[in-house]
Structure formats: C-alpha cells, structure tokens
Image (spheres, helix red, strand yellow):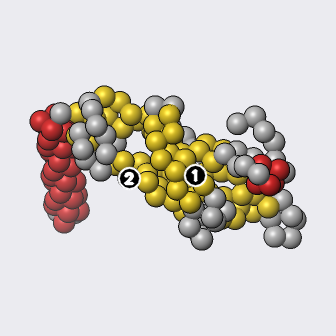
Amino acid sequence: MSRLGLLATRISSFRVGPTTASVGDPVTVTGKLEYYNPTPWVGGWYPLPNRTVKLVINNSVAQETATRGDGGFTFTFYPKELGTYWVKARYDPSGLDAVLYNPCESSEVAVQVVAPEEKQRRDLMLWGLIAASAVAVAATAVAVITYTSRK
C-alpha cells in the first residue's frame, strides 16, 4: 500500500457480524468504497463503483468482489475452525486506477469462533443483561412516577 495515486480513497460504513460465531456460521462483511474529490465546488466523498475489493482474513486474501453502483460491497464467509479471525477489507488499485486512486484498508475486526455451547452461553448472558436492564429501567420509571404523584 505504498503507491500514491492522485485521489484519496476510504472504506466507510464497514461492518462485520456476528463477531461471535460457531464453526460453519455465516459471517457477513459489508462496507462502501469511496474516493475524495478535492474540487472546491463539488468536493467530498463519492462512491467508487465497479472496483475490486478484497476480503482479508488473518492477513490472507480470502475473497474478492466488485463494488456495486453505490460503491457498496458484501462478503459472506463461513469459519472452518475455532479461534480468532481478524477481518478487514482492502482496495488495491491496478492499471490506470493505480495512478488515479490511493489504496486503502478498513479497520480490522476480530471474529471469535467458539464451540456452539460457548456461543449459546454468551447469547444467554447477553439476553440476561438486556432483561436485567429492562427491569431496572421499568423499576426506575415506576419509582419516578410514584414519587412525582405524591407531590
């Protein structure tokens, strides 16, 4: 990624999910490739359609896809073994694009691939936390209503 093109690029709206999965579960990666137009009267970030974006997992290219008309892209991968998968997207322009556009990468996101029992335990803990928070909010609301109605 040391080449220098004329225009900056970025991967925005980058999402990976779920970040905890079991072996064989689908993990979806989405984002949007954009370039920066520095022209004063129309400057800003614009979609970069029909360009190849790479899905990089643990520093190896796993898949490639072309961006859509809005610059968006989607990958789905299915982890094959337990462990941590470091996931990012990368744009490496080639040909004339290498003169026009700079390469870029998304941030890197960790996907934890755990045994199904561990994933179920984590999911139950999350739902328990959500339920406890809802109860706390409801109890606070009742207390506030009771307090203000006594005045």
State whether residue 117 is above or below residue 55.
above
Residue for point 30% across, 50% down: 26
**Residue located beneath label 1 in the image:** 53
Quadrant in which the C terminus appears = bottom left
Quadrant in which the N terminus appears = top right
Which label was assigned to residue 18?
none
Q: Count numbered badges in the picture.
A: 2
- Determine the residue located farthest toward the top in the rendered image: 83
- Determine the residue located farthest toward the right in the rendered image: 40
- Disc 2 residue crowd, few under 14, some 14–19, many 20+, Cα 10 Å: some
SS of the residue under disc 1: strand
- Disc 1 residue crowd, few under 14, some 14–19, many 20+, Cα 10 Å: many
| Quarter of the rendering containing residue 142 | bottom left
Question: Which amino acid type is shown beneath numbered disc 1?
Answer: Val
Question: Which amino acid type is shown beneath numbered disc 2?
Answer: Thr
* For residue 93, side relative to residue 4 (left or right): left
* Camera-side residue of 128 and 95: 95
Which label was assigned to residue 76?
2
* Camera-side residue of 27 and 139: 27
Residue for point 86% across, 64% down: 39
Give the CA distance from mark 2 to mark 1.
Answer: 13 Å
Residue for point 22% across, 40% down: 22
Instruction: Tell me if residue 120 can be seen.
Output: yes
State whether residue 39 is above or below residue 134.
below
| Quarter of the rendering containing residue 114 | top left
State whether residue 61 is above or below residue 52.
above
| Disc 2 and disc 1 in contact, CB within 8 angstroms | no
* Camera-side residue of 91 and 32: 91
Q: Position of residue 46 (x, y in %)?
A: 69, 65
Q: Position of residue 112 (x, y in %)?
A: 31, 34
Instruction: Tell me if residue 125 can be seen.
Output: no
